[in-house]
Image (cartoon, helix red, strand yellow):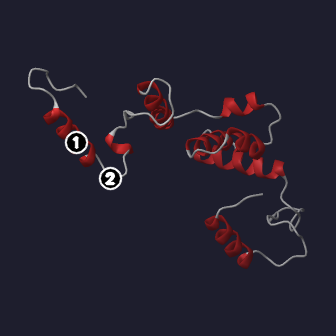
Amino acid sequence: MYISPDTHRALLEYLQVRPRTKARQVFLVEKSPYTGKPLSVRGIQKRMEYYARKTRVTVGCHHLRHPMATQLLNADAALVSIQDLLGHSPIKTTQRYCRVSNLKVKRDYYKAMEVVMPRTLSGGRAGGGGSAPTPPEFTARGNREGQEKRRTERQALPLRHPPPRR
């Protein structure tokens, strides 16, 4: 199981306040005849249902899988990694969980165009001229360098031709 550094810190803090026990499991039942026994999957589900009813929020354990898968995908995690984390056998099951955001699609489009456009402009040869249409928010130094380059290109054009549209 993988956990983030902040989750690791929270677990260590929890273990400091949890009653001492010989149980190797982290989460234990605190009330009922099962006090001190490991908390079961069904026990977690029942707690989620209880707090959902109490707060009138429609949520369950299963609802947490969708946003996790989507966030991982939007952070460029490989679909097969997400598949493994969710415990799916067929990749199609994982694809249902992953709702791709427009930002991810936009980022992928511009990333792909940086590869495709130079090939297209050079007639299919690798490393040819031309540049991909990268929007300002995806450039490392803003748009200043691109504006200067376009200004220089326009000045080099013959006066009888209008400047190219960008």
SS assignment at label 2: loop
Above or below — where is 46 with respect to 100? below
**Which residue: 62% across, 47% down?**
54
> Compared to 64, does 19 lie above or below?
below
Q: What amino acid type is highlighted by mark number 1?
A: Gln
Vertical position of residue 145 compared to residue 130: above or below: below
For the point 8% across and 25% down, which residue is it? 159
Give 27 or 153, whichever is nearer the viewer: 153
Image quarter in which the N terminus is found: bottom right
Mark yes or no: residue 57 visible: no
Image location of residue 138, percent across then percent down: 39, 44
In this orientation, which residue lies closer to the viewer: 121 or 111? 121
Q: CA distance from mark 2 to mark 1?
A: 12 Å
Left or right: 146 with respect to 129?
left
| Residue 96 in view (yes/no) | yes
Q: N-terminal of the two: label 2 or label 1?
A: 2
Dot 1 crowding, Cα within 10 Å, few <14, some 14–19, many 20+: few
Quarter that holds the C terminus: top left
Could you tell me residue 5's position as x and y percent? 63, 67
Residue 51 in picture, x, y percent from top left: 65, 50
Kindly identify which residue carries mark 1.
147
Q: Is residue 100 left or right of residue 9?
A: left
Residue 52 quadrant: top right
* Tags 2 and 1 touching, CB below 8 Å: no
Please state which of residues 5 and 40 is positioned toward the viewer in this rendering: 5
Give the label on residue 141, or none: 2
Would you say 65 lies left or right of 46 here? left
Counting from the top left corner in percent of width and height, residue 29 is at 82, 63
